[in-house]
Image (cartoon, rainbow, N blue to C red):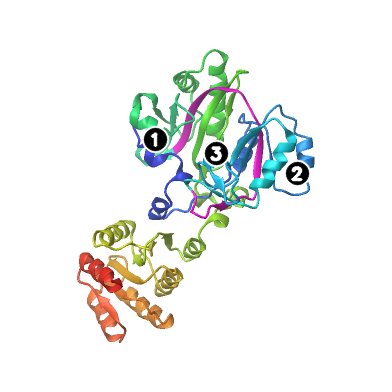
Amino acid sequence: MINIAAHTLRNTLNKKITALQQVRHLNLLEFQSKDLLQKYNVAIQQFKVLDNSGKDAEVLKQFECPEYVVKAQILAGGRGKGTFDNGFKGGVHITTKKDEVLDLTKKMIGNRLITKQTPKSGIMVKKVMVARSVNIIRETYLCILLDREHNGPVLIASPAGGVDIEAVAEETPEKILTIPLNIDKPIPQETLEKVAKFLEFKGKCIETCAEEIQKLFTLFKAVDAVQIEINPLAETDKGEVISVDAKLNFDDNAQYRQKEIFAMDISEEESDPREIEAAKHNLNYVAMDGNIGCLVNGAGLAMATMDIIKLNGGDPANFLDVGGGVKEDQVLKAFEILTSDPKVKGILVNVFGGIVNCATIANGVVAASKKLSLNVPLVVRLEGTNVDEARQILKNSGLAIQTATDLDDAAQKAVAALN
């Protein structure tokens, strides 16, 4: 069985892990994902999108529902239990009154929603999705994703939907079904029915569920998705099988084919500006809460560097990976990003030169230190290709650069420099 925790909900994975993988996935809001599902005839709740404009009242006039679900649209989970910076509680509300929909919308839009998955300051809500409430009698889980272990797409299903799927996989693995799929063919009917029955659908709902799964697989291939997660795939009191909540992730390499979809990306609006600037220069940056800025090459080395800083009593201020093909100008940009964080009181450079030439890093460090008039302690540990030349460059620079013999030595010096 594949590792559910490592593969599900890509857009809710910890940002640090995303950075380690050097992947910048397109992120869509819930209503955007549902709009895509709707275009491929996947059964969803009817919905409208409000933005506090003068058109909201007119939009609602044409949307009659016995009960409305009002949901703030941000790229984060836990919205229902979140709190806005204006004191209003809950990013998800249910009401039967149309006038109350507009009132709820005004309390959400233009304010920052704080949940367990947002920064401490929250994320600004710019749009609200209003959907027709459905009477759900049962919730299941369905996911189609690309999996390296299976060299292609797999389908993951569970009758225990609407909850944390990682917990289901850990506590009741028998409730998880994993089936490899052939990317070049539709899912066989017998497989579709097997999944529907595993999800505990009965009677006509088996056929309906099978049809919905096939539509989702068609969508998956058509839009170059790397994951489509439906949680829950719900059965209603009217015998409908509906994708109530959908999360989609896409192959960034397919952007040239999926221009319309990628044009909807709003991730930059909700990201740390330093992350955006780093991405423009092919750098990976994730802010943390410490005061020692870290510049490294390679995700594994980055994690080791942060761990050893902690082990020696310090706190890393960030994760910044310059990658394997770094140039001098990227080193300068990395230093600019590091020093833009007022919490950074010292910098540790830890580079192992395999593909990277240590002399390139050394020249970049010296140039950046001079151009930025660096006034915080700087510790540099270099090892690998052209390391002797690199050390000589640092030594001849005339700058107050501390060099280290190994990683532990570097971490000790970085922590000591701050103390």
- Extreme residue toward the front, this view: 87
Of residues 51 and 223, the one nearer the viewer is 51
Classify mark 1: helix, strand or loop: helix
Of residues 419 and 79, the one nearer the viewer is 419
Q: Of discs 3 and 2, which sits in the foreground?
A: 3
- Range shown magenta: 118-145
Residue 286 is left or right of residue 104, and the answer is left
Classify mark 2: helix, strand or loop: helix
Q: Residue at x 48, y 61 (%)?
A: 275
Q: Amino acid at mark 1?
A: Glu
Name the residue that disc number 3 marks.
80
User: Which image quarter holds the N terminus?
Assistant: top left
Q: Residue at x 38, y 54 (%)?
A: 20
Name the residue that disc number 2 marks.
56
| Residue 335, image quadrant | bottom left
User: Which image quarter holds the C terminus?
Assistant: bottom left
Q: Amino acid at mark 2?
A: Asp
Q: Position of residue 225 (x, y in %)?
A: 51, 42
Q: Earlier in the sequence, mark 3 or mark 2?
A: 2
Q: Position of residue 336 (x, y in %)?
A: 45, 73
Name the residue that disc number 1 marks.
166
Q: Amino acid at mark 3?
A: Gly
